Image (cartoon, helix red, strand yellow):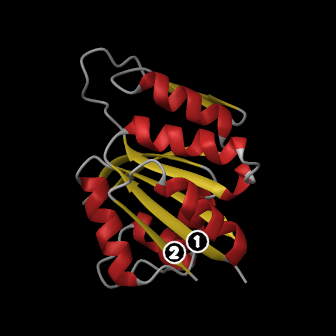
Amino acid sequence: MSSSTVAIFSTHEGAEGAITDLQRSGYDMKRLSIVGRDYTTDEHVVGYYTTGDRMKTWGRNGAFWGGIWGLLFGSAFFFVPGVGPLLVAGPMVAWIVSGLEGALVVGGLSALGAGLVSLGIPKDSVLRYETAIKNDKFLVVADGTAVDVARAKEILSHFHPDSVDLHP
């Protein structure tokens, strides 16, 4: 049975450091996702593109997103009403699409919320994570066995997230 750990980071440096540390520890990078808002209103944004599993973006956090696309598998851009433009990397892309296809968008949840619910995260936590994204924070999501996500939670905690939750 799959479990998950979700951490909220105020800065992309914290989220990136945590992902890099998880990679160094041998965590399966196919089990990690990151979600953050896109900053398409920056003056110097040129755009973004995808070639295979890599997406590059320019703008305020361009170097951050470019590095993340190289570490995680799968990337997407979503416009989520009520949340805004999102950049997503990792299996969260499939969870969001699966949630939408499964008509999980009920009870006021966005596409992001539907993806998190399809992972088994409780609705009260989902609403807190959506609020964090609306406030320009970053979600790092690790899924896997109970042992794997407990180890991920310990590593994520070293980077002083706003919160880190284990969802069995």
Q: Give me the residue at 66% from left, 43% from top.
A: 72
Residue position marked by numbered label 1 in the rendering: 4
Q: Quadrant of the N terminus?
A: bottom right
Q: Position of residue 116 (x, y in %)?
A: 49, 71
- Tally the marks: 2
Residue drawn 38% across and 74% down? 126
Mark 2–mark 1 distance (CA, rounded to whole Å):
6 Å
Q: Quadrant of residue 46?
A: top left
Q: Is residue 30 above or below residue 102?
A: above
Q: Residue at x 47, y 57 (%)?
A: 157
Asked whether the beta carbons under mark 2 and mark 1 sit within 8 Å of each other, the answer is: yes
Q: Horizontally, is 146 left or right of 75 in the view?
A: right
96, 24: nearer the viewer:
24
Q: Which of the numbered marks, if any, corresponds to residue 84?
A: none
From where the camera sits, is residue 81 visible?
no
Residue named by callout 2: 166
Q: Nearer the viewer, residue 139 or 55?
A: 139
Disc 2 marks a residue whose amino acid type is Leu
Foreground disc of the pair 2, 1: 2
Q: Where 133 sits versus 126, above or below?
A: above
Q: Quadrant of residue 109?
A: bottom left
> Dot 1, how many residues are within 10 Å of its Cα: few (below 14), some (14-19), or many (20+)?
many
**Is residue 122 something that shows in the picture?**
yes
User: Residue 54: percent from the left, percent from the top?
Assistant: 66, 31
- Residue drawn at x 55%, y 81% is 120
Q: Quadrant of residue 81?
A: bottom left
Q: In the image, residue 87 lies at what x, y percent?
A: 45, 43
Q: Earlier in the sequence, mark 2 or mark 1?
A: 1
Within 10 Å of disc 2 (Cα), the crowding (few <14, some 14-19, many 20+) is some
Looking at the picture, how far across and down is residue 64, in whole percent? Answer: 47, 29
Looking at the picture, which amino acid does disc 1 mark? Ser
